[in-house]
Image (cartoon, grey):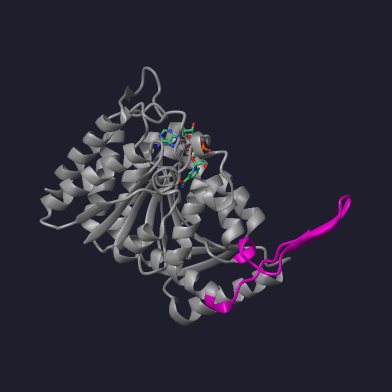
Amino acid sequence: MKILVLPGDGIGPEVCHEAVHTLKALAQARGLSIEFQEDLAGGAAIDAYNDPMPDEVIEKAKAADGILLGAVGGHKWDHLAGAMRPESGLLKIRKELGVFANLRPVAVSAALADASPLRPEAIAGTDMLVVRELTGGIYFGEPRGRSGEPGNEEAFSTMRYSTGEIERVARVAFEWARRRGGRVCSVDKANVLVVSQLWRDVVTQLQAREYSDVELSHMYVDNAAMQLVVRPSQFDVILTGNLFGDILSDAAATLGGSLGLLPSASVGGKVGLFEPVHGSAPDIAGQGIANPVAMLLSAAMMMDELDKPIIATAIRAGVETALNEGLRTADLHREGTTTKVGTAEMAARIRAAALDSLN
Ligand code: NAD
């Protein structure tokens, strides 16, 4: 198994290091051979190659089985524009890999219920997966434009989806539902948008044709936004388009109490990209205090995708044990109730507990 590691900038290298260390330990314990290759991305690649995502890195990515990415960006590169920005390197690699489905699981561990902005009883039992279409919809739709004179301008973007684009991402959601709670809630705005009416028709037909074992419901996006903060535990898999998914997945991300907990995967091409939801956190970079959990759970998603669920489950068990023991990095620590640890100490406990769970 070949993994390309792109640590990136800021806390990216700190948390990536822990993920690689953990994967190596678990792979060794299972007699599994994983080859890690590392390269630069984002600001680090701009400094070295004058390009946030050089073509050679893309080639290595395409030849790998999975890609672990830390985070990119930072103040040093904030003055750069367009294709030279660290974040444009991310867009490039997603596009080149053809990863059309973004997966964001949000599970709130019982140990962290008090860290959520919602009341513990409102958040209890939350365990959802947001499947967002990533390469179509209004962010890419043509025509788009802006015309007219200042003071009398007009601008427009187009939300378009084809049957094929809807089917392929819906399939990802249905497949995941089969591995989870067996329920998909498709979110759209079919009461107003024609494009959502097609979305709803295609999802309904696909379910009837191929996934009748999965329970399908539909929800308007305005209601979904409300339900996410009123009763998030009702959701299993949420399937939605690019724009609605962008907004809803960020709202869902706040439920857990820290960005440092949330993993993501972008899949659908030959190779998947696995990265934490958080950015490079320049405000805490280099201090050894970043929460490694999001990165470790991203590595677990990669192991699931590469059909190594035993390793994925062990990582998740390790995280649960460390949290249950009261270990917290600074983002989640509460004076008097939890034990404050740094990145390395948190990851070491997770690793040890993950190894224990294998035995
Ligand atoms: P951010 O996610 O980096 O940080 C937001 C806040 O959350 C900060 O206070 C940070 O300290 C905290 N935080 C984030 N991850 C944490 C972790 N693992 N442990 C503890 N605390 C954590 O978002 P931002 O500050 O808006 O952006 C910083 C830089 O990251 C920018 O250059 C931005 O463009 C970039 N960015 C990159 C990605 C990516 O690589 N996918 C995503 C978002 C932002």
Residue 258 seen in the current view: yes
Residue at 50% from the left image edge and 44% from the top image edge = 253
Left/right of residue 306 with respect to residue 233 in the rendered view = left
Which of 181/81 is in front? 81
Left/right of residue 187 with respect to residue 297 in the rendered view = right
Left/right of residue 225 with respect to residue 265 in the rendered view = right
Which of 39/264 is in front? 39
Where residue 248 appears, as percent x and y from the top left, is 57, 51
Where residue 329 appears, as percent x and y from the top left, is 35, 29
Residue at 51% from the left image edge and 34% from the top image edge = 75
Which of 59/351 is in front? 59
Which of 327/212 is in front? 327
Residue at 62% from the left image edge and 60% from the top image edge = 139
Find the residue positioned furthest to the bottom.
209
312 in magenta: no
Find the residue positioned furthest to the top.
336
Q: Which residues are magenta?
A: 137-164
148 in magenta: yes
Is residue 94 placed above or below 293 in the rendered structure? below
Q: How many marks?
A: 0
Where residue 44 appears, as percent x and y from the top left, is 40, 43
Residue 99 seen in the current view: no
Where residue 132 appears, as percent x and y from the top left, is 51, 60
Is residue 44 placed above or below 212 in the rendered structure? above
Q: Which quarter of the figure is the N terminus placed in?
A: bottom left
Q: Quadrant of residue 176?
A: bottom left
